Amino acid sequence: MSNITFNNVELHLQEHSQHEFLLSNKEVSLGYGVVAKTINDHRSNHKDELLENKHWIRLSVQTKGGKQKVIHWTKKGIVRLGFFIKSENAKKFRDWAEDYIVNAQQQIPQPTHHQINGYKSQPSQHNSKIRDLEKQNALLQAKLEQALTPDSIWNIVNDGLKYREAKKQVKELAPLFA
C-alpha cells in the first residue's frame, strides 16, 4: 500500500481487503518504542480485549527461514493496543495513530521536539477538543433530526391546542363549582 514515517521509523502499511490495512507486529513495536515481546505479552494478557480477526490476524509470510505465520495488527488493533502500553513514545504514537489511522488517513506532519515540549503543543490539544465537540455536535444534530419529524411537530401543536381547549373549558366550568 504505502510507506509512512513516524519518529524517523518507516512503517509499511499493507493493503488488506477486510481490514483496509495492516502493520506487522514488528512495525507496531517500533512505533510504540517497545520490543516485539512486549506487544506479544499485551496480546496474551489482554486476549479478552485484543481479539483475533478484529484487532490482529496471522498471515503467512515468506521469510529467510521459509513461510511463517506472522502477526499483523489492524487499525483498530493498533489503537486498542495503545491503551495498554505506557511510555512517552507510546503516548506520541497513540496521538499519531488517532490522527493518521482513525481520522485523516493521510500522513500527519511529525512535531519537532520543541513543539512537543513547548507552547506549540497546545494546538493539538485544541484540535482534539474540537474533534470531540464536533462528534458531540453530530450526535445532538442526529437526535434533533429524529425528534423534529413532521409527525412529532404536529403532535406538539395538537397537544398545545388540546391544552388550550381544556384550559378554556375549566374557566367556563369554574363558576359552577365555586
Image (spheres, rainbow, N blue to C red):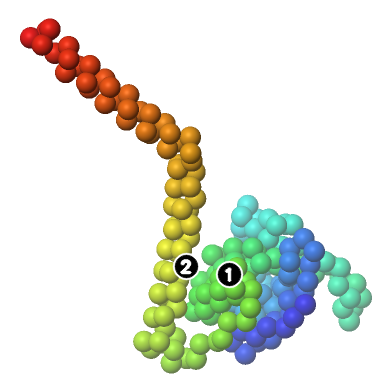
| SS for callout 1 | helix
Closer-to-camera residue (27/133): 133
Q: Position of residue 95 (x, y in %)?
A: 52, 74
C-beta proximity under 8 Å, tags 1 and 2? yes
Please identify the quarter of the rendering in which residue 90 is found. bottom right
Please state, as top left, top right, bottom left or bottom right, where the C terminus lies in the image. Answer: top left
Closer-to-camera residue (121/93): 121
Q: Residue at x 45, y 78 (%)?
A: 124
**Residue type marked 1:** Asn
Q: Residue at x 41, y 69 (%)?
A: 129
| SS for callout 2 | helix
Q: Which residue is mark 2?
A: 131
**Residue type marked 2:** Arg
Q: Residue at x 26, y 26 (%)?
A: 164
Q: Is residue 113 above or below residue 140?
A: below
Q: Is residue 97 visible?
A: no
Q: Residue at x 86, y 68 (%)?
A: 60
Q: Position of residue 37 (x, y in %)?
A: 67, 72
Q: Residue furthest left?
A: 178
Q: Is residue 102 left or right of residue 129?
A: right
Q: Is residue 1 visible?
A: yes
Marks 1 and 2, the one that precedes in the sequence:
1
Q: Residue furthest top?
A: 176
Neighbour tally class for label 2: few under 14, some 14-19, many 20 plus, Cα within 10 Å: few
- Which numbered dot is residue 80? none
- Which numbered dot is residue 103? 1
> Mark 1 to mark 2: distance in Å?
10 Å
Q: Is residue 13 left or right of residue 156?
A: right
Q: Is residue 125 left or right of residue 60?
A: left
Please identify the quarter of the rendering in which residue 170 is found. top left
Q: Position of residue 169 (x, y in %)?
A: 22, 16
Q: Position of residue 123 (x, y in %)?
A: 41, 80
